[in-house]
Amino acid sequence: MSDTNQPAARERIELEDIGSNPSPEQTIGSLIARRLSRRAALRGLMGSAAGLTFADQLLASATPAAAQAPAPAASPSSLGFREIAHQLTERDAVPEGYEIQPVIRWGDAVLPDAPAFDPQRQSAAAQATQFGYNNDFIEFFPLPRGSRSGTHGLLAVNHEYTDPHLMFPGLTDEEAARQKPTREQALTEMAAHGMSVVEIRRENGRWAPVRESRLNRRITAETPIRISGPAAGHPRLRTQADPSGRQVLGTLNNCAGGSTPWGTVLTAEENFNQYFGGAAAETGAQAAAYKRYGIVAKAGYGWGQHVGRFNLDIEPNEPNRFGWIVEYDPYDPDSVPVKRTALGRFKHEGCTYAISADGRVVFYSGDDERFDYVYKFVTARPWNPNDPAANRDLMDEGTLYVARFLDDGRMEWLPLVHGQGPLTEANGFASQADVLIETRRAADLLKATPMDRPEDVQPNPANGRVYAMLTNNTRRKPEQVDRINPRPSNAHGHVIEMIPPGAGTDRVDHAATEGRWEIFLIAGRPGVDAGAQYHQGTSAEGWLSCPDNCAFDAKGRIWIATDGAPGTSKVADGLYAADTSGPGRGLTKLFYQAPTGAEVCGPCFTPDDETVFLSIQHPGDDKGSNFASPSTRWPDFNPAMPPRPSVIAITRKGGGVIGS
Ligand code: FEO
Ligand code: CA
Ligand code: CA
Ligand code: CA
């Protein structure tokens, strides 16, 4: 969700992202900043030529880049498509020579017994068999398993949240629609959350779901899920329905995600706070812990009026069972998903992996809240490529770290281990389970660096660098600026690179506790928005705002999806591509522009790079838009149909590699 372009959406983000870190200004970075001279800081960034150049630009006053620099005659970008023009319309757009195919829409059949979608007569039972709402993360798993097929596979898709005012006939007010659902609406929304697994095939150039596939699956807010890892069974995870603290119904607000080297899906529970409410938020024994996660008395969703476990006064521990990374096997529709508590509890945006030089697997994850943190988890043991069973519970043992960025260009990963440093009984941590259940408070005590809303954090296999999309943070005050978050009132966000030892070689030490960082770009309109920084060849169409999700193609180029282009800029959200090395490094180009009201999520390439899948989320979610009178009826443009969140495939007409 965005917080900048739609007043209608603003109150929602207030609830889900209230910036609940109480002491964001206490950064080690800001302390160091006072000690380091400008010259010394510059010297620290001299690890690479690109870093020096960029640091120099950062230290200069907010000089616009592209607006004053004539575009070079021949673009240094390796991306061969002809950039499209920014737009804000009912429709979406791709470059000449490319085409958009709808793959699956909200309400389309997933399970073989699904009824035809009828928006006037929705039910929880029907929705539990149909594609859910607000698709976000996408991963493509080739079929047969272990192949590199680019034309046949499983799509694993997250359904992050619901917009009842756009879903159900007769609702107009967005807030009332969320907070006062009928019982059937609440149950239907619960069924529209979770995930879908859909077998898809490309024949004669066209992608289509395989209707009768036995692999097709829905996971909803009511699917039984196992809890594993150090927090499993802890008293704070026990409820009346589950005295074991090891089994929970459903997964919520699944935003981005990732995969594992052994072929499972990871799905990230993000803004879980908004489903829970009750007086206990202010008066209960866990009030302080609720507050740090943004759980307040008045829930954003009114499900608790019908389903007791969402009411804190009935079930105070239920929210402790959300905010985790969930793993499931997309190839086995009967597999039980697992919440992996060793990776910590926060508003996980996504979870992506790199294999460290010694074979241990490192998972990166951002906590998407203003002034919250970047994390990584390092497995205790290497993974075993030859024995899938040996990897089954690999994510249950390892070390969770949080990032501290120093102003001299270095960074440190601080271990969140019970008994170490301040993570002791004296500070309310009786065990590792307590550290994990209250990951945010543990990271506060370690003095991690408060960031500008970390969304996707993803390693680029081509150069070993790890990219973090910092989507925005308009609440950062000038005195809270540091070098990794260099802009006050950051409305447009920026993209940073974390550089582990060995990056650029074939032995990258992703497990290391130290590294370096650089800034890749600072978003916004060059020459208009203070501090915007790109490659000087970035065109008037190539600037972006509010980076959210990203993907890398086989050439190591970054594809950035945006969420929240400010209304004043008259630009819809989109997908932008840039080189990450060479003369075109940081030269973003606009490849896809979404319909009005939508954000773009889940860029995902097939192994042959001939298709990129995108999640088009909340089309038509503009101010005043509702089921009867939406700002767009994308993708059907049928007067009988509301706008429908959908997964699309973008391919080249006649075939070929995207962006080549
Ligand atoms: Fe669900 Fe942080 O986007
Ligand atoms: Ca977002
Ligand atoms: Ca989203
Ligand atoms: Ca997101």
Image (cartoon, rainbow, N blue to C red):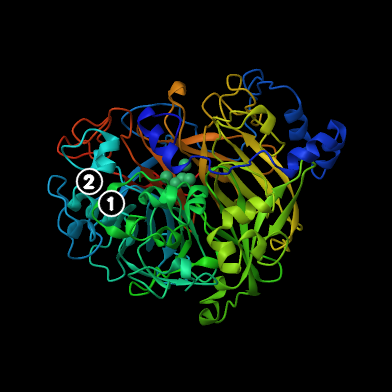
Q: Is residue 488 at all visible to an observer of this figure?
A: yes
Q: Secondary structure at mark 2?
A: loop
Q: Quadrant of residue 68?
A: top right
Q: Toward the viewer: 29 or 197? A: 29
Residue 36 location (% of width, % of height) = 85, 36
Residue linked to disc 2: 181
Residue 208 location (% of width, % of height) = 29, 56
Q: Quadrant of residue 485?
A: top right
Q: Quadrant of the N terminus?
A: top left
In this image, 644 relative to 611: left or right? left
In space, the residues marked 1 and 2 are separated at their CA atoms by 7 Å
Under mark 1, the amino acid is Trp
Q: Quadrant of the C terminus?
A: top right
Residue contact between numbered discs 1 and 2, judged by CB atoms under 8 Å: yes
Name the residue at 27% across, 62% down.
210
Under mark 2, the amino acid is Pro
* As drawn, 333 above or below 473: below
For mark 1, does the 10 Å Cα neighbourhood hold few (<14), some (14 to 19), or many (20 or more) residues? many
